[in-house]
Image (cartoon, grey):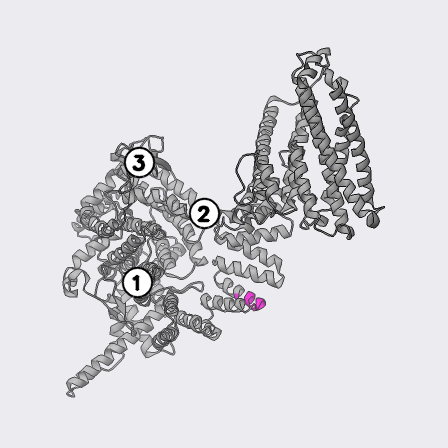
């Protein structure tokens, strides 16, 4: 039978009973050879050569037929793609002729799907044979035809060299055009030279017209999910044929379930990957199909290789195939913005080839004139068992075989390409790759010889690093080690080196010292990709005009067809495992670089040749030549009046929404770009409901558009549809996890609905990609505190102040942090008092303290605690009255997560707890202490930056208070919060100065006339007086502490030695009380006539009486000490 054995994934061919090869094994050998060739392995080609020799010796007609298929596969490996397509699927050309002739002869009855229907019908006819061996043979022929067609398309649009003659498919279109018109030259009537020339010109125009119509038909066939082909590609018919052959064969075989080709799903997924790269947007249908097919392929490679066992050539081939399957699966997810799904496949790919990839450091130099070596970020590669890779293992058999097969490939084409590109490197003293020290170990990737699979893996890891990390100035440097490791290899692949030079050019484009070299590198890349000069252009009629490539005439190139095919075959290795752009998009990137440097005249021919109308119109607008752009588009519309891209470009140019509507009409209601343009036009006019309708219609066709979902969410917010807005923003971040604005808006919606945990995670993602928006940091500070992430909240406040230059601060967030620190200190004090047992001894009694028990100052502690707490609570209740934002601080505290580390401190009072639980609690307490210390230090820095004036900050904690008092521009709202922070730290003197500053700021209000202002000023004055009393009490405690530290001395010695210091401290305390007394008397005297009898007025009178009593007691104490 023809069914291949599923358990033996792509095993080498075996022999039948009579000594000849089994046909199922022949099919497997052909599949294996085709796959291995594009994983840069040569064993498959050698196996095919041996198999062709054995089949050629047989006389059985079946052997002859199978030998023809093997020879066709060898043609593919040699680069003779058109020959292989003609050999295996000659009926494709006849179907092309019939379909294109129908466009000319029967345009009204022509069906757009006629060509696809014919191809699928032919595949069904070929596979209708009941003999399974014949069915397997036909299926393999169709597979080879699809692969050859796909590779010929890639040769023309990805790697080159581009042949200067039209393909056989285009010649069939020309034949259809000629057959549809009578041949007047053979009618027997003599014709003059002018008439013959006119007929020839008409024939060319008719050919060109049919070619454009056929190309339009092909582009319709390639369009999917509302996305059309984004640029001008060469021979797009080849890609369409590859898709029809491979997808049709896969669909037919799965329906019949009798013949199985292991690699068919893989090649079909590769063709769909190339289709996706040609389209202007992501397609959900292609995503689903590609992922499903690649998952089927990976079923053949379940068991990872054991790196400790001997690696045979067959095992290395299987590992290369499995590694390629994993990398291509990761790249498929990358195409659709799902970077999170890439990581497991890249890890699995590394496991198949038995390595681990990590970043490390090495000493090296970055510039030509650098003397001292500095640490450089490099890639380190180790085997799975942790041992460094040996040089012979890193290179392996594959690179040696590549070098042998290509006969000096590295030293010939690749080295010349590198020299061409690096020729411009001398324009800068910065090295493209760091010059590492010569004594590096073999773990550094650039120090050894990497196999092709390892190079594919490193470049895939580079792409993952780009997608996963934040988009900032460091992202290019994180990618650089992977690029430098591959570009430094002495043996590599053409596309791998091209991709490295492209990534290096992108990195250097943003640096002033290397931007010129970047531009030169881009020029060389474009030239090497197609082996044509950059002044190639397309005329208005669409005819391509070429200069002589590399000094050769077209005849000379045509005569050297074998060399061209060999070159194409070499260049295409690795084309499916490397993300290298197609030629139109590479030229677009070069054109954008030229526009960025002001070279519009050089960029415009590039955009026009690739039919990148949006970029071309931008150039015309920059040159203020909009009429010329309009004339160009109208001229193009004469040849392709149903091209929706042109109508959209005309709408952009003339700012006319009717052109978008016409583009939507001519596309049959499938061109999502036209619908998105209508949505943006309505959005610009603030017609939210209409814009919302257009966005929904566009996203119904193609939902893989993150910016579309973001705009839909914005329009939904404007129309009041919050549920749809949340859904739209969620879809946007699912499709593009780097969409910072969508994350931020999603967080804002969660905050509005009081879902603070979801808002916290959303804002954390947003800040990964947009770290310079103080609005996002301010929102993040709020939700971090509401979720109990105190350190992150404090850090976010610091970031807000940094980005807003200390102009923005929310006092409510500062109050939350201070309140949590107060709870922490109170909990620590309670814990210490519970775990400590005091035994009073006679020698522990402080004589001075005992003698001063009757001192009125000792009562300040209780009075301050009682009065202070009541004042602070009143302060929190009246936030709005003191000019603070309407922010519910208690709500923020209530929304704190139950996992708050501070609240877990109460669990330490449990008596019966096992050792493990006790250790866990102690670890959490340790983290809590660290967090509290970090938050306290950050709060100190916050207040320091808030109150420090420009140029006044001299640094140091001791200077903070002096700096604070000298800054007149600091917001008055900060001072009471700063005073509370100082009180918590026991810095009562600093607290009095902060509150005094706050009271002075309130004196500018009409407090003696306005009731609200008087109440605010009165409460602030009461807080100031409490702070004065605490400061006075602090002085008394300082005396007691000094005396307690000298308890070894006699009471007389203490009094004698500290008398002067004691008097000085007591006098300082008296000054605090005197200041409080004078402050209150001044307020009471000024407001007596207006506010006498008010609650605040009565509280100030009571506070004044207490202060007068305490001051009198303190004066008496000073007198006693002075007399003594």
The boundaries of the magenta stretch are 686-694
Q: Which circle marks residue 470 in the picture?
A: 2
Q: Nearer the viewer, mark 1 or mark 2?
A: 2
Q: Position of residue 593 (x, y in %)?
A: 34, 58
Q: Which circle marks residue 238 in the picture?
A: 1
Residue 1065 lies, with reference to residue 515, above or below; the image says above
Mark 2 and mark 3 lie on one chain; the one further toward the N terminus is 3
Query: Is 474 positioned to the left or the right of 924 in the image?
Result: left
| Callout 3–callout 1 Cβ contact below 8 Å | no
Q: Nearer the viewer, mark 2 or mark 3?
A: 3
Q: Main secondary structure of the magenta part?
A: helix
Query: Is 918 positioned to the left or the right of 557 in the image?
Result: right
Q: Position of residue 453 (x, y in %)?
A: 31, 43
Around disc 1, counting alpha carbons within 10 Å, would you say few (fewer than 14), some (14 to 19), or many (20 or more)? Answer: many
Query: Is 865 positioned to the left or the right of 1057 in the image?
Result: right
* Closer to the camera in the image, 933 or 716: 933
Q: Position of residue 73 (x, y in %)?
A: 24, 53
Q: Which residue is mark 3?
A: 373
Farthest-out residue, front: 1123
Disc 3 on helix, strand or loop?
loop
């Amino acid at each position: 039978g023809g069914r291949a054995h599923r358990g033996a994934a792509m095993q080498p061919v075996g022999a039948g009973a009579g000594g000849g090869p089994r046909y199922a094994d022949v099919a497997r050998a052909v599949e294996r050879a085709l796959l291995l060739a594009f994983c840069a392995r040569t064993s498959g080609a050698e196996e095919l050569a041996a198999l062709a020799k054995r089949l050629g010796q047989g006389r059985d007609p079946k052997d002859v037929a199978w030998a023809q298929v093997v020879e066709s596969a060898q043609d593919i490996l040699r680069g003779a793609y058109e020959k292989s397509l003609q050999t295996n699927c000659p009926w494709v050309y006849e179907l092309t002729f019939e379909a294109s002739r129908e466009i000319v002869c029967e345009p009204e009855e022509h069906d757009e799907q006629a060509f696809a229907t014919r191809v699928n019908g032919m595949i069904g006819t070929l596979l209708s044979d009941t003999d399974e061996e014949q069915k397997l043979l036909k299926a393999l022929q169709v597979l080879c035809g699809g692969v050859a067609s796909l590779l010929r398309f890639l040769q023309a649009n990805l790697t080159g060299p581009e042949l200067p003659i039209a393909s056989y498919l285009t010649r069939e279109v020309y034949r259809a055009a000629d057959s549809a018109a009578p041949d007047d030259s053979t009618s027997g009537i003599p014709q003059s030279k002018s008439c013959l020339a006119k007929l020839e010109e008409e024939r060319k125009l008719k050919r060109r017209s049919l070619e454009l119509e056929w190309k339009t038909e092909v582009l319709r066939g390639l369009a999917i999910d509302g996305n059309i082909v984004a640029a001008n590609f060469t021979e797009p018919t080849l890609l369409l044929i590859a898709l029809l052959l491979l997808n049709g064969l896969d669909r037919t075989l799965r329906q019949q379930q009798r013949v199985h080709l292991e690699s068919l799903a893989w090649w079909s997924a590769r063709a769909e990957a190339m289709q996706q790269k040609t389209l202007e947007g992501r397609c959900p249908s292609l995503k689903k199909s590609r992922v499903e097919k690649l998952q089927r392929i990976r079923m053949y490679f379940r068991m990872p290789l054991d790196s400790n066992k001997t690696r045979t050539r067959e095992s290395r081939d299987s590992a290369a195939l499995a590694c390629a399957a994993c990398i291509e699966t990761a790249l498929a997810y990358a195409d659709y913005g799902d970077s999170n799904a890439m990581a497991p496949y890249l890890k699995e790919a590394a496991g198949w080839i038995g390595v681990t990839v990590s970043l490390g450091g090495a000493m090296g130099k970055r510039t030509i004139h650098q003397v001292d070596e500095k640490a450089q970020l490099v890639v380190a590669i180790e085997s799975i068992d942790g041992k460094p890779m040996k040089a012979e293992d890193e290179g392996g058999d594959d690179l040696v075989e590549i070098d042998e097969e290509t006969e000096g490939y590295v030293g010939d084409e690749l080295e010349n390409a590198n020299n061409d590109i690096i020729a411009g490197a001398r324009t800068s003293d910065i090295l493209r790759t760091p010059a590492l020290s010569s004594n590096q170990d073999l773990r550094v990737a650039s120090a050894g010889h990497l196999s092709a699979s390892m190079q594919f893996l490193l470049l895939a890891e580079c792409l993952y690093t780009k997608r996963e990390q934040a988009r900032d100035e460091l992202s290019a440097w994180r990618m650089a080690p992977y690029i430098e490791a591959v570009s430094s290899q002495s043996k590599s692949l053409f596309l791998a080196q091209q991709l490295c030079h492209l990534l290096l050019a992108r990195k250097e484009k943003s640096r002033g010292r290397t931007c010129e070299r970047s531009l030169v590198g881009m020029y060389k890349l474009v030239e090497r990709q197609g082996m044509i000069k950059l002044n190639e252009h397309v005329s208005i009629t669409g005819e391509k005009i070429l200069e002589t490539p590399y000094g050769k005439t077209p005849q000379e190139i045509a005569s050297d067809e074998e060399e061209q095919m060999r070159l194409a075959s070499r260049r295409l290795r690795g084309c499916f495992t490397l993300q290298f752009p197609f030629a139109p998009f590479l030229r677009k990137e070069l054109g954008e670089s030229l526009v960025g440097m002001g070279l519009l005249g050089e960029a415009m021919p590039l955009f026009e040749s690739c039919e990148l109308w949006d970029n071309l119109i931008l150039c015309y607008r920059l040159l203020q030549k909009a009429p010329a752009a309009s004339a160009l588009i109208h001229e193009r519309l004469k040849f392709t009046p149903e091209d929706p891209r042109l109508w959209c470009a005309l709408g952009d140019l003339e700012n006319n929404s009717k052109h978008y509507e016409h583009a939507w009409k001519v596309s049959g209601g499938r061109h999502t770009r036209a619908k998105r343009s209508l949505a943006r036009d309505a959005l610009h006019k603030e017609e939210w409901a209409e814009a919302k309708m257009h966005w929904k219609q566009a996203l119904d066709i193609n939902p893989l558009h993150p910016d579309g979902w973001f705009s839909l969410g914005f329009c939904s917010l404007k129309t009041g549809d919050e549920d749809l807005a949340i859904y739209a923003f969620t879809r946007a971040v699912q499709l593009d996890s780097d969409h910072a604005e969508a994350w931020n808006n999603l967080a804002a919606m969660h905050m509005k609905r009081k879902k603070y945990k979801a808002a916290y995670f959303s804002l954390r993602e947003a800040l990964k990609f947009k770290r310079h928006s103080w609005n996002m940091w301010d929102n993040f500070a709020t939700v971090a505190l509401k979720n109990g992430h105190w350190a992150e909240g404090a850090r976010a406040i610091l970031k807000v102040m940094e980005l807003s230059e200390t102009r923005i601060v929310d006092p409510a967030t500062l109050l939350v942090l201070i309140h949590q620190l107060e709870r922490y200190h109170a909990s620590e004090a309670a814990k210490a008092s519970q775990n400590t047992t005091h035994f009073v001894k006679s020698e522990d009694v402080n004589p001075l303290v005992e003698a001063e028990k009757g001192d009125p100052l000792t009562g300040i502690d209780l009075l301050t605690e009682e009065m202070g707490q009541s004042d602070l609570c009143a302060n929190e209740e009246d936030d709005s009255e003191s000019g603070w934002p309407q922010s519910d601080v208690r709500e923020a505290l209530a929304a704190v997560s139950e996992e708050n580390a501070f609240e877990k401190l109460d669990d330490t009072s449990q008596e019966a707890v096992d050792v493990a639980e006790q250790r866990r609690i102690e670890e959490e307490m340790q983290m809590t202490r660290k967090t509290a210390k970090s938050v306290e230090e950050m709060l100190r820095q916050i207040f320091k930056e808030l109150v420090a004036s420009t140029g006044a900050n001299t640094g140091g904690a001791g200077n903070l208070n002096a700096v604070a008092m000298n800054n007149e521009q600091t917001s008055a709202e900060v001072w009471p919060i700063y005073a509370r922070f100082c009180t918590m730290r026991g810095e009562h003197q600093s607290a009095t100065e902060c509150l005094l500053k706050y009271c002075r700021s309130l004196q500018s209000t009409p407090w003696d006339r306005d009731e609200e202002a008087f109440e605010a000023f009165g409460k602030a004055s009461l807080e100031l007086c409490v702070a004065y009393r605490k400061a006075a009490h602090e002085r008394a405690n300082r005396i007691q502490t000094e005396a307690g530290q000298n308890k070894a001395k006699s009471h007389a010695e203490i009094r004698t030695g500290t008398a002067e210091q004691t008097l000085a401290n007591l006098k300082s305390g008296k000054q605090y009380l005197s200041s409080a007394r004078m402050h209150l008397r001044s307020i009471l005297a000024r407001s007596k006539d207006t506010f006498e009898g008010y609650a605040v007025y009565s509280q100030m009178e009571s506070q004044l009486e207490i202060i007068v009593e305490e001051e009198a007691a303190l004066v008496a104490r000073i007198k006693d000490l002075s007399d003594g």
